[in-house]
Amino acid sequence: MNGHRAALLIANDEYEDERLTRLASPARDVAELGRVLGDPKIGNFTVETMRNAAEHRVRKRLEEFFAHRRAPDFLLLHFSCHGLKNDPGELFLAAHDTRVHLLSSTAVSAAFVDQQMRESRAGRVLLLLDCCYGGAFSTGVPRSGGADALQAFTTPPDDGRGRAVITASNAMQFAFEGGRLADGSEPRPSVFTSALVAGLATGDADENQDGQISLSELYEYVRGWMAERSPHQTPTWNVGGQGTFIVAGSPRRPIVPAPLPRDLEEAMRSADYYRCLGAVTELQERIQESDLAVAAAAFDALQKMARGTFPDIRKRAKSAVADSRLAPEPGRLDFGRVKQGEDSPPHVIQLHGPPLARSCVVKVKPPWLRVQSRRDEAGFDAWVDTALSPRPLSGEMTLTGYVGTYDIPVEAVIEPAAISTGISFVVDATTEPGENIWVVGDDGALGGWDVGEALLLASDDYPLWHVEVGIPAGTAVEYKYVRKDASGAVDWEPRDTNRRAVVPDAGRYGVSDRWGE
């Protein structure tokens, strides 16, 4: 009996209570994650999304979602919203109509979600909790102590069912958002959700390359991905139950060559020239097969015959191997100049070659490059995340398959958007040759505390370093300066607390700082 795979993605980024700041990431979170989870070759989930729904609608849909399930079912629940705690430290998830002083009656309690998970008859339940605590606290909402987010959900009993919770951060950290809010800008997913999407979409989370992504593999991938890009944020998890917890399939399913027919193998080894010639001809036909196992066996066999006895046979075999290679078009991507916050038109990479060559996965090294498979399976769409700070960008995407790899260089330049409101940063700092000063902070425009996305300051008035950053009016930001050398080594300015600034309703707010003071 096959089970049903259902995913409910709940995003709340706009709030009636003015003390809850609008969030930049949830809308893009559910769009990106929903695309991957709904892909029949990856998540194969039936995906439903709720955005900016009232508390009573969220609670009703949650109860419906977990009810009337069967043991083979796999349920995935994803929350992207503000997380709030009351005085005793109980966790609540903010809905569109949540009031911070009436959490029990206007917010979704973690205890309610936990109860629905425990009472469901589904054999597998996974909760992904991507709550932004910092946005709420920065507006004057009291920050209570008490249990961390993970402890709000009970440890699952060993009752034959699998239940797991992965949270974006621990009790002492905030879940950083990816994008800034500005007119015309398109926010990117949060750091946590970006890691989930990257691990699932590329198959990089499939550590043992068995074609399946287990819960432990996904968590370890997310933890490592975030450690590189957002060291201030550490995901946590809690898992219980029996059996292997498989979250998704991997696009990196290994291709196992099929056995060759005995007479074909004998012809390959024959000392008779014409029998070998016939073998090469048949292998050339087999390598074009849509059955990848058959084509893979032919590819391996032709590589062997390319080292054979007869020069002409070797030449024919080498030519057949070369013709079976992947040929992407174009071989280089140049997005040119794109404005910060504006949509980047997608570039299409067409894949040419036999089915075996086109059966490849794409690995994107720079986090600012987005890639999505085309529905016709004949290539990929690629575009640039323009929520980054203005700068030249360079990197590469690697196409990997059974017949080998192909690297495609990628370049783009993010140009500054027109600044109506923002902050003018000036800092007095000395450096050694090869060193530069950068600013990084909690707002997406300042990199979301990701040092790799920090903003470079200009040094034309050394030792004063300066940069102007467009940030929406009324935004309160925390930031620090860092010093980087030519090797990329980072030195944080020696301050116990973060610097703070608030963007005015009009114009730019100027800060004049001194390194470490």
Image (tube, rainbow, N blue to C red):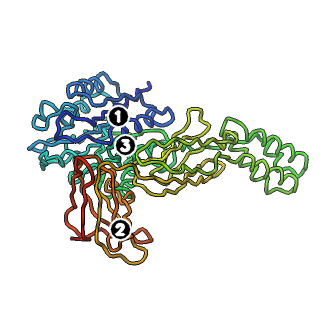
Check disc 1 and report the residue beneath it. 76
Which amino acid type corresponds to the residue marked 2 in the rendered image? Ile
State the CA–CA distance, disc 1 to disc 2: 43 Å
Side (left or right) of 128 relative to 354: left
Residue at the bottom extreme of this rendering: 432
The percent position of residue 367, horizontal first and vertical second, equals 45, 52
Q: Is residue 246 above or below residue 232?
A: above
Side (left or right) of 80 relative to 362: left
Residue shown at the point (33%, 68%) measured from the top left: 465
Which mark's residue is nearer the viewer, 1 or 3?
Answer: 3
Residue at the top extreme of this rendering: 68
Label drawn at residue 437: 2
State the CA–CA distance, disc 3 to disc 2: 26 Å
Label drawn at residue 332: none
Secondary structure beneath dot 2 equals: strand
Side (left or right) of 323 relative to 72: right
Q: Quadrant of residue 244?
A: top left
Q: Which part of the image, by quadrant, shows the N terminus?
A: top left
Nearer-N-terminus badge (1/3):
1
Which amino acid type corresponds to the residue marked 3 in the rendered image? Pro
State the CA–CA distance, disc 1 to disc 3: 24 Å
Q: Which part of the image, by quadrant, shows the C terminus?
A: bottom left
Secondary structure beneath dot 1 equals: strand
Residue shown at the point (63%, 41%) measured from the top left: 350
Label drawn at residue 187: 3
Q: Residues within 10 Å of mark 2 (few under 14, many from 20)?
A: many
